Image (cartoon, rainbow, N blue to C red):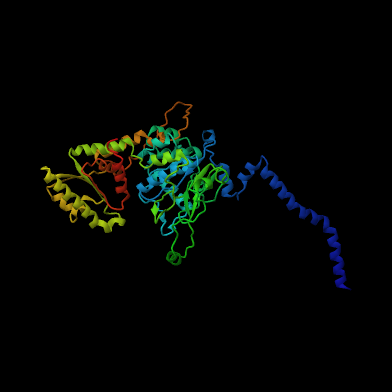
Amino acid sequence: MDWSAASRSRWRKRTQRSKPLLFLLSFLPLSLLLLFLFLLTSSYSSLLRSLLPFSSPRQTLDHQCGAGGGGALSGERFLWYAPHSGFSNQVGELKNAAVVAAILNRTLVVPPVLDHHAVALGSCPKFRVSAPAELRAAVWDHIMDLIRDRRYVSMADIVDISSISSTVVKTIDFRVFASMWCGLNMEKACFGDLCCAVSGSGSLSGNFDQCRSLLSGLHGNVDHCVYTVEEDCRTTVWTYQQNSDGALDSFQPDKELQKKKKISYIRKRRDIHKAFGPGSEAETSSVLAFGTLFSGPYKGSELYIDIHESPKDSRIQSLLKQIEFLPFVSEIMAAGKDFAASIKKPFLCAQLRLLDGQFKNHWKTTFSELKQKLLSLQSEAKENQLNGPIHIFIMTDLPRANWTQTYLGEIEKNEQYKLYTLQESDDLVLKAAERLMASEHGLKSGFLPRIVDGNNEKRICDPSSLPDILLYVEESACSCASLGFVGTAGSTIATSIELMRRNNACKS
């Protein structure tokens, strides 16, 4: 028997019989795929997506974008950024954020005061910085820590932004934004009744991780929801109406740094209005999220934001002048003035930053400047035949117990001088903190929703802890020092005090 012929005959026959079945089997997957696509794009799509175990984070986030706001936030476009480093740097970022928000016609989300260096950027001059998405996530995480510890204080609770928020820039407190846009309950971030009423409407079981992912940009941009800015100071200097869009910036990494760090960054100047304004991909997004907005002069250029004048736009030009000096809120200024008045004599203020690692090598220089100033005051007193000690307010991070073997220890023992200090536990500071938190400036300076309570019951939250406002009261007191001011060279705190003194903050 010819087995090969039989075999061929047998397989040919089976192939003929199986053709209809094979055709149906091959068509079945295509049919199921078409049915799946129809359901996915039909009115049943929401239900289907919710049942899918493999739904992507992007799909879920896109569906929930801004779901908590409802009609109250309809049409609003927001600007969020990631503050970092010390308080003075955070104030600088707030100013830059106000300018960018005004240029792009967005509502600025005002963040809380972050703990000193709880979030670090890195070094722009060394081209070693955290990526914007990482920075935004770190800021969110620290804000959540502040809320859990009941230590939340808005930047607008400390810095008076009423002059700009009521005219040029629309603002919204982060607590209100998170409650309405993310649908989160922010009661633990509240101290007063107003905050409790407008920030506690969200759900205690709201998806905090989902909002974190959205605002951080960890899953990329979400169409018409969040547009994240990934350009940072390594590649970009933002400008406005300078006719330099796309041009190389004057500061670039030198060859030694390129070789040592193996970097190939090229810094370009870009117009921020062209990049994110009308006609841009970001324009229709509900939230435009930056990383850092810190900047500063460096080698003839700016590290990240180079917007100092706007002659073609009078609105922005006016804002730039207004933000040159933003004072502390009235409760802080009043406490500083009260302390200055309690000295009852003209006094000198000495701001001595001695424990910060950046300034440890400047002790001799700092003390030398103070010594020269005191000798000058002694000479003037002798010429004018004035008797009595020279009154000095000492503002320092060095504990008094450690003054002994320093110049501070010498002048403390010298009867020619009378020293004054402030402590966080002083009654003047504590009462100022109570008045400050009761005022709720952070909430009142920005957008507030209509409070609707069908039961007409007043919502009451457990108050958060009092903030540490010692530094701000000390700065305010230093602005009132009629005998002058000696500060630590390079300290942003000293720069802040000098700015207050130039603007006669004590007299306003």
For the N terminus, the image quarter is bottom right
Residue 360 in view here? yes
Q: Residue placed at 11% from the left, 46% from the top?
A: 382
Q: Is residue 85 left or right of residue 25?
A: left
- Residue 403: x and y in percent read 20, 53
On screen, residue 338 above or below 121: above
Residue 301 image point, x, y percent: 42, 54
- Residue lying farthest bottom? 1
Residue 227 at what x, y percent from top left?
A: 53, 47
**Residue 430 in the image: above or below residue 141:** above
Q: Nearer the viewer, residue 480 or 217?
A: 480
Near-viewer residue (118 or 456): 118
**Residue at 52% over, 53% down:** 246
Quarter of the rendering containing residue 194: top left
> Which residue is at a point 48% across and 44% down the rendered structure image?
208
Q: Please state which of residues 482 and 176 is positioned toward the viewer in this rendering.
A: 482
